[in-house]
Image: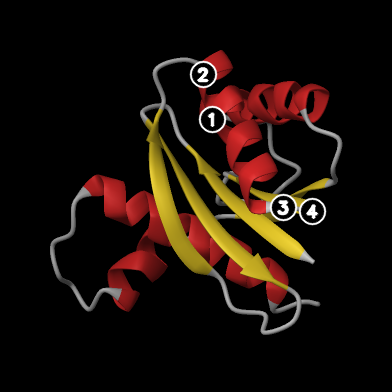
Amino acid sequence: MKYLGIDYGEKRVGVAFGDDVVKVATPFLVLDNSGLDGVIRDIEKIINDEGIEFVVVGMPYALSGKDEIPGMQEEETNIFIAKLGLAIDIPIVLEDERFTSVQVDQLMAGRKIPGKKRDAVSAMLILQSYLDKL
């Protein structure tokens, strides 16, 4: 099964690929978030072009836990997921993305990398976290 990992953000959306055979996620690209409808169209195209069968979206839960009142980014991500769910006909699951930024920093060994690359690596870490549970 082919998976798409998504790190949804206000300015950029990181995208990664993976599958359940080798269970390794790889960064793919970063979409500029110039509007929700455009991002949804771009993701639909990726899903169709790449034969994606399953989507994993990072959820920015509050640091204290999933049961806390949702923050603004969590609410925006929920809106994105709801609209994406209406546009595609494949499963979407949520994966906790807390500490992804710290993991990206550790993975890149403190090197300065542009935000765009960081977002794709974040999407990879989100997807890898999910694949590791399979």
Q: How many marks?
A: 4
SS type, badge 2: helix
CA distance for labels 2 and 4 = 21 Å
- For label 4, the crowd category at 10 Å Cα-Cα, with few meaning under 14, some 14 to 19 and many 20 or more, is some
SS type, badge 3: loop
Which quarter of the figure is the C terminus placed in? bottom right
Q: Which residue is mark 1?
A: 42
Which quarter of the figure is the N terminus placed in? bottom right
CA distance for labels 1 and 2 = 6 Å
Q: Which residue is mark 2?
A: 38
Specify which label sits upstream in the sequence, 2 or 4. 2
Q: Using the rendered view, name the quadrant where residue 2 is placed.
A: bottom right
Residue in the foreground of this view, choosing between 85 and 79? 85
Q: Are marks 4 and 3 in contact (CB under 8 Å)?
A: yes
The colour scheme applied to this rendered structure is secondary structure
Q: Are marks 2 and 3 in contact (CB under 8 Å)?
A: no
Q: Are marks 2 and 4 in contact (CB under 8 Å)?
A: no
Residue at position x 56%, y 71% from top?
25
Residue in the foreground of this view, choosing between 87 and 64? 87
Residue at position x 65%, y 32% from top?
44
Q: Using the rendered view, name the quadrant where residue 19 is placed.
A: bottom right
Percent x, y of residue 78: 69, 28
Specify which label sits upstream in the sequence, 2 or 3. 2
- For label 3, the crowd category at 10 Å Cα-Cα, with few meaning under 14, some 14 to 19 and many 20 or more, is some
Residue at position x 75%, y 75% from top?
20
Percent x, y of residue 70: 65, 31
Specify which label sits upstream in the sequence, 3 or 1. 1
Q: Which residue is mark 4?
A: 53
CA distance for labels 4 and 3 = 4 Å
Tag on residue 52? 3
